[in-house]
Image (tube, grey):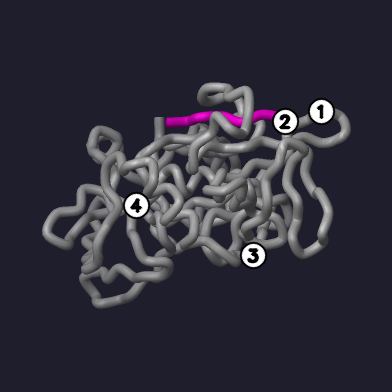
Amino acid sequence: MLFGICNLSMVPLRAAKADQSEMISQLLFGEHFEVLEKEKNWSKIRLTFDHFEGFIDNKQYVEITANFYHSIVKETPRYSSEILDFVTNKKNELTTIAIGSELPLLQNGEFFLEHQKYTYENSVFEGKLAKHEILKIAFTYLNSPYVWGGKTPFGIDASGFTQMVYKLCGYSLLRDVKEQATQGEVLSFIEESEPGDLAFFDNEEGEIMHVGIILNDYHIIHSYGKVRIDTLDHSGIFNTDLQKHTHTLRVIKKMI
């Protein structure tokens, strides 16, 4: 088995082995994975965090040993906390990183991607945070543009938004909205929910297509055109700009 790690700011994860293929997710700096298949230009990978699979360009990651990979897997992850930050290698070259980038085996401001040494000087997210922290982190992404497959404040989709917010709080959500809807405890009514719970929405065919994070006072924050705040009622999401319901409520889930 081969293993790899992302050594760039963000890398597209594609549905097929071609630059023209749909971006189904992204890898952020420091994310590690198993290499399932490696060809001349492309590798099929499985991310360790959420087991999501896709194809990445071989020029956009570095291979790591099994020993290094397993040492990362065993540790409590540390994630960068600034919307935009940077790390520096031993040549004093900067690599910009987005919030939620992983800093493997970080100690005293230094970490390694196998043999490459980096420094990082700011605070990190580490371990499981209190549930109210979910809202604070969610607001960090407010007004981020919607981008299918995106996972950063510079472009993020609905399930990427909920996954990243929970990830920074120390909790694991799956990548796809339909997969996230299989997690957690079902709540019967909005009144039973707490800020930080997730609301899922379906289309006319009954297929779950959207998700957002419940706020106080019957509001929701979600990625729809941009990360925005709207009203949540028993019917679904009432868009305050369009003055109409845009999503039909299917189920509310308590994840923590």
What amino acid type should be assigned to the residue bearing mark 4? Glu
Q: Which residue is mark 2?
A: 250
**Mark identifier at residue 206:** 1
Q: Earlier in the sequence, mark 4 or mark 1?
A: 4
Query: Looking at numbered disc 1 in the image, what kind of residue is underneath it?
Result: Gly
Residue type for callout 2:
Arg
Task: Indicate the quadrant containing the C terminus: top left, top right, bottom left or bottom right.
Answer: top left
Q: Residue at x 63, y 28 (%)?
A: 189
Q: Identify which residue is drawn at 21% across, 61% down.
A: 117
Alpha-carbon neighbours of circle 2 within 10 Å: few (<14), some, or many (≥20)?
A: many
Q: Nearer the viewer, mark 1 or mark 2?
A: 2
- State which region is magenta: 250-256
Magenta portion: prevailing SS class: strand
Is label 3 or label 4 in front?
3
Residue 190 in the figure: left or right of residue 111:
right
Mark nearer the viewer, 3 or 1: 1
Dot 2 falls on a residue whose secondary structure is strand
Residue identifier under label 3: 145
Instruction: Please tell me which residue is depicted at 66% across the width and 35% down the height of the picture.
Output: 200
